[in-house]
Amino acid sequence: MVKIHRLADVQSPHIGKNTQIWQYSVILKNARIGENCNINCHTFIENDVIIGKNVTVKSGVFLWDGITIEDDVFLGPNVTFTNDIVPRSKKYPEKFSTTLIKRGASIGANVTIIGGITISKYALIGAGSVVTKDVPAYTLWYGNPAKQHGFVCECGNKLSSELHCTKCKKSYKLQNNTISEL
């Protein structure tokens, strides 16, 4: 069962079961939202947006055309996305930039994400960062502009220098600049 607050404006019929949509959210008619999502209050989701399963979208997040959010993603309060790298009032690009947030990524509060990039699986972006380029899987980024500051486990814990998680005990290996679980 979908739970939609009476003060939300949900025009899309493409809402997965067990998804909750809170007050003052606007979801346009062609947006697609998967199962078991939590769309907090004061959010806006445009037509050409796809949201996977088990996604949390906190308050103040606006998802513009061209954004795809895969399963198990967390978007913190006031995450800001862009989709036009040369914006001008009343002049629109032939095609908006596309942005992909892959499975399990977590984006902290007040992060700005420049359009046209990919944040790979299980990456963690620290609060207040400005992300201007692609982010590899299992990496920790923060700052303005955001830079890599280590690696993270699927559970979100920062990995040791030996690529071991002290919280859940998983270990990883780094090969050809790509991290994977052992």
Image (cartoon, helix red, strand yellow):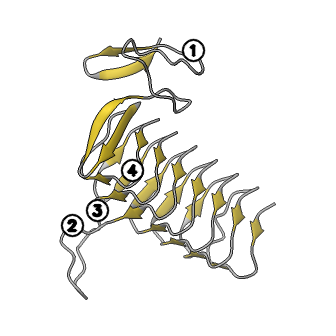
**Amino acid, disc 3:** Ser
Give left or right: position of 117 versus 47.
left
Q: Earlier in the sequence, mark 2 or mark 4?
A: 2
Please provide percent x and percent y for residue 47. Answer: 48, 72
**Amino acid, disc 2:** Ile
What is the residue that sits farthest to the right in this orientation?
1
What is the residue that sits farthest to the bottom in this orientation?
90
Q: Secondary structure at mark 3?
A: loop
Please tell me which residue is depicted at 39% across the width and 50% down the height of the picture. Answer: 100
Residue position for label 2: 85
Give left or right: position of 95 versus 44.
left
The quadrant in which residue 10 appears is bottom right
Residue position for label 3: 97
Please tell me which residue is depicted at 60% across the width and 54% down the height of the picture. Answer: 56
Q: Nearer the viewer, residue 1 or 5?
A: 5
Relative height, residue 59 to residue 179 (above, below): below
Q: CA distance from mark 2 to mark 4?
A: 16 Å
Residue position for label 1: 169
Relative height, residue 133 to residue 57 (above, below): above
Please tell me which residue is depicted at 37% across the width and 35% down the height of the picture. Answer: 140
Task: Give neighbour class at mark 1: few <14, some 14-19, many 20+ (Cα, 10 Å).
Answer: few
Q: Nearer the viewer, mark 3 or mark 1?
A: 1
Q: CA distance from mark 1 to mark 2?
A: 41 Å
Q: CA distance from mark 4 to mark 3?
A: 10 Å
**Amino acid, disc 1:** Lys
- Residues at circles 1 and 2 in contact by the CB criterion of under 8 Å: no
Please provide percent x and percent y for residue 70. Answer: 51, 47
Q: Earlier in the sequence, mark 1 or mark 2?
A: 2
Residue position for label 4: 100
